[in-house]
Amino acid sequence: MASLPFELRGKTVYVAGHRGMVGAALVRRLAAENVELLTVTRNEVDLRDQAAVNAWFAAKRPQVVFLAAAKVGGIVANNTLRAEFLYDNLAIAANVIHAAHVHGAGKLMFLGSSCIYPKLAPQPLREDSMLTGPLEPTNEPYAIAKIAGIKMVEAYRSQYGADFINVMPTNLYGRGDNYHPEYSHVVAALIRRFHEAKV
């Protein structure tokens, strides 16, 4: 028998990364739901700080967690800031996923990335292609951190029965994107260049 859809109504919902493109879109969408929406800025709680994350979860006790927080960027950012992309994203995923488990979140959604698949994976991509070959070298640290988060979600689901899930977006762009001339993704960089050329 198929399980019923997860019900958000009346729940306390935390969006980690609410100022980013995906997190902001989630906040806009959740505003139409009957939920108590929780957000916290980086200045209030650094998600790389395990003690701070744990204390915040203990105080707020979110029932639902959307984990959209991440250090993100385009090819230049990924290839230049390799250590930060690996450390920051590993720490964010580990701290938030574990705190959600420890403090009884009923549902968690972790936002993955299409870069988790091997550079030469057969097209169209299939989920079972993950970990079957070498990653794209320019964004390997980010991909490894995302793969670790995905596997952490799977482990908490299998070991503890946690209702934690992964979603894999393809290339995203839109409102709230990063249009930095060097560190943005391709589509945002092109939009910026088109705009500047027109102006």
Image (cartoon, rainbow, N blue to C red):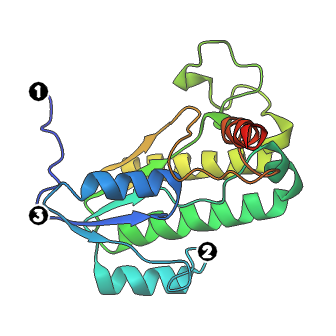
Q: 157 above or below 13?
A: above
Residue kind at label 2, given as amino acid type: Arg
The mark found on residue 1 in the picture is: 1
Which one is closest to the eye, mark 3 or mark 1?
Answer: 3
Question: Marks 3/2: CA distance?
Answer: 29 Å
Q: 17 above or below 78?
A: below
- Does residue 139 appear anywhere in the picture? yes
Q: Which residue is mark 3?
A: 10
Q: Residue at x 58, y 66 (%)?
A: 92
Q: Residue at x 59, y 59 (%)?
A: 70
Residue kind at label 1, given as amino acid type: Met
Question: Marks 1/2: CA distance?
Answer: 40 Å
Q: Residues within 10 Å of mark 3 (few under 14, many from 20)?
A: few
Q: Which numbered disc flags the more N-terminal residue, 3 or 2? A: 3
SS class of the residue under badge 1? loop
- Using residue 99 as the reference point, say whether residue 4 is left or right of it: left
Question: Marks 3/1: CA distance?
Answer: 26 Å
- Residue 55: image location, x then y, percent: 42, 87
State if disc 1 and disc 3 touch (CB < 8 Å).
no
Q: Residues within 10 Å of mark 1 (few under 14, many from 20)?
A: few
Q: Which residue is mark 2?
A: 48
